[in-house]
Amino acid sequence: MAGIDEAAEAGHPMTEEYTDPRTGRIHRRRRRGLSNGSINKVLAAVRMVLKEGKRHGWIEQNPLGDSDCFLPQNAPRRSSWRSRRSRPCCGPHTSSTVNSESSSGATCAQSANRMSG
């Protein structure tokens, strides 16, 4: 990744070409290094191989046996069904024409969930 960063700092970022599978068009995009999660997956696979080597007595210790060898990674930013369900779509309803629960301040999503369930 050092080469990618150095090229970007010099004003000439490394690029790669890829073909969009949907359209068949060729695009250029900046190259980027592996994420910490991808690196950790490779390290986990190597650790399993080294663990077998230690078990068979081919190596004395597993250098990846310690969890400190892995890189920190952020949790993925995903919305959960709970956060989508509880999020108001347009605010509280005060109109009595929506349904009887709307006067209690229920949102569209909450009213829809109560009516369907």
Image (cartoon, rainbow, N blue to C red):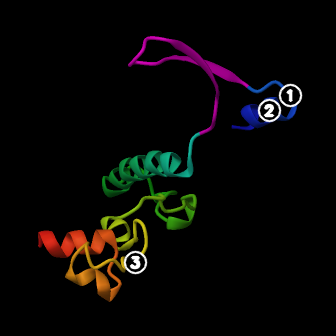
- Residue nearest the viewer, comparing 89 with 69: 89
Which residue was labeled with disc 2? 8
Label 3 vs 1, first from the N-terminus = 1
Disc 1 marks a residue whose amino acid type is Gly
- Residue nearest the viewer, comparing 27 with 109: 109
Q: Nearer the viewer, mark 3 or mark 1?
A: 3
Q: Position of residue 31 (x, y in %)?
A: 64, 29
Which residue was labeled with disc 3? 92
Q: Position of residue 95 (x, y in %)?
A: 33, 77
Left or right, residue 31 beside residue 81: right
Question: What segment is highlighted magenta in the picture?
Answer: 14-33
SS at circle 3? loop
Q: Residue at x 45, y 58 (%)?
A: 60
Q: Is residue 26 above or below residue 13?
A: above
Q: Position of residue 61 (x, y in %)?
A: 47, 60
Q: Nearer the viewer, mark 3 or mark 2?
A: 3
Q: Position of residue 40 (x, y in %)?
A: 49, 52
Q: Are marks 2 and 1 in contact (CB under 8 Å)?
A: yes
Residue most toward the left?
117
Q: Residue at x 49, y 57 (%)?
A: 64
SS at circle 2? helix
Q: Residue at x 43, y 73 (%)?
A: 91
Q: Are marks 3 and 1 in contact (CB under 8 Å)?
A: no
SS at circle 1? loop
Q: Residues within 10 Å of mark 1 (few under 14, many from 20)?
A: few
Q: Residues within 10 Å of mark 2 (few under 14, many from 20)?
A: some
Which residue was labeled with disc 1? 11
- Residue nearest the viewer, comparing 33 with 48: 33
Q: Is residue 18 rendered magenta in the image?
A: yes
